[in-house]
Image (tube, helix red, strand yellow):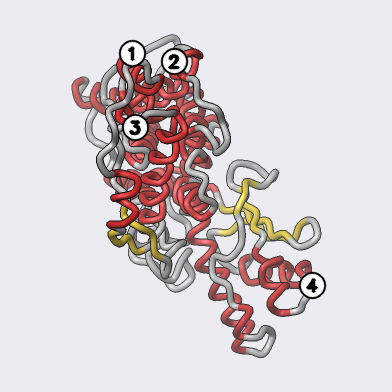
Amino acid sequence: MITGDLDAELARSLRALADTGGLPDAAIRPGGGTWRPAPGGPASYATSLPFEVSRLAGRPPAELADRLAVSLRALPWVQAAEPSGAGYLTITVTASALAGVAARIAAAGPGCARSDALRGTAAPCVPWPDPAAAATWAQAREEQASAMVARLAGAAGAKISPDSGRERHLFGQHPVPPANSPVLAAVQYFGADAVRYVLARNPPGRSYQLSAIGAGDIEPYQAVQLAHAEAASALRWAAELTLGPLRSDLAAAGPRERPSTGPGAAPAAGLGEAPEAAPGEQLAAALGTQPEQELLAALSWLPERVASAARRNRPDEVPRYLEEVAVAWTACRLAAPALPFGGTPAARDPVVASARLLLADAARAVLAAGLALTGISARGRI
């Protein structure tokens, strides 16, 4: 979602350059670059957009990166913006902007994966297949990937339309799989959701011998489900312990009416209005440990990872991203617990405790949204 905010600001900067004659109109490429984490820390993001614009404008990418950096540095929620390499643009947002991610995700709930990155494109509507009905691993993987890419594209703003011919071809009447089908045997032993997840996380070209490999292939799925259940349990236990609801002032650190200088001229990444220039300063102070910062950074990538996976036809990137979030959540839960359980003392400051619960809610929402895009329901208890 931070990358969505930055895309909106970069589009405005490119438009301003074109309006003043600095770029041809054909060079305007909103959201045209590829984002990746930058080495500057959890709040740093790098884009290849200057390279994309350079090919259309006939200008050196390093020069374009420098001019775009100047415009971004004027934003109060951007801490730094500098050209890097031969033309990449690296941006570091403020601690308040990064912390505001937790409030924005918690407010968006199931919609936290949405963006408009693929707006203007179209994708066929492909129903979820039954993995047990596939005769081979190759067929099971193809059907899972087709259905998943359609969901990812829809979440990224593509128009989803029925494709009855494709549905008849891929999802018509399957022959009854033979009794020795490895897919059917795996579903019977591990369960349909576990098998679906393993299919989803495997890249194209992998051989599928799940029934021969065993339970080790299910461990990533179990880790993601466990992380979701732990985050959901933290919220449930907080209510049962009458620790009080989330502080309304902290929860309000996310979607608000956008000021003229805030991130994004329009709702960013489908999460309502973008945050104010310095959102959640109190929230940022409460979530200041390194594990909390790393979890916030991981959560901020969900819409971008979903859009990239759909664009590249690589649905396996989403489950692997969820595994990164699960690892970050576990580290955060152990180092900075919100509840008085385990060996690490919980926060005594009610503001810190409430902020940590808000972060748990955001982690829960991201994991649930990602699993839903894989065709799997998240578990609130294990």
Whether residue 355 is visible to the viewer of this picture, yes or no, is no
Image check: 176 left or right of 59? left
Q: Are marks 2 and 4 in contact (CB under 8 Å)?
A: no
Return the disc, 2 or 3, that comes first in the chain's sequence.
2
Marking on residue 189:
1
Q: Where is residue 121, by image quadrant?
A: bottom left
Q: How many angstroms separate mark 4 from mark 3 (CA)?
A: 46 Å
Return the disc, 4 or 3, that comes first in the chain's sequence.
4
Q: Residue at x 32, y 17 (%)?
A: 179
Q: Nearer the viewer, mark 2 or mark 4?
A: 2
Q: Are marks 1 and 2 in contact (CB under 8 Å)?
A: yes
Return the disc, 2 or 4, that comes first in the chain's sequence.
4
Mark 2: amino acid: Ser
Q: How many angstroms separate mark 1 from mark 3 (CA)?
A: 36 Å
Residue position for label 2: 211
Q: Are marks 4 and 1 in contact (CB under 8 Å)?
A: no
Q: Nearer the viewer, mark 4 or mark 3?
A: 4
Return the disc, 4 or 1, that comes first in the chain's sequence.
4
The picture places residue 80, in percent across and down from the top left corner, at 66, 57
Task: Judge whether 117 appears above or below 24 on screen.
Answer: above
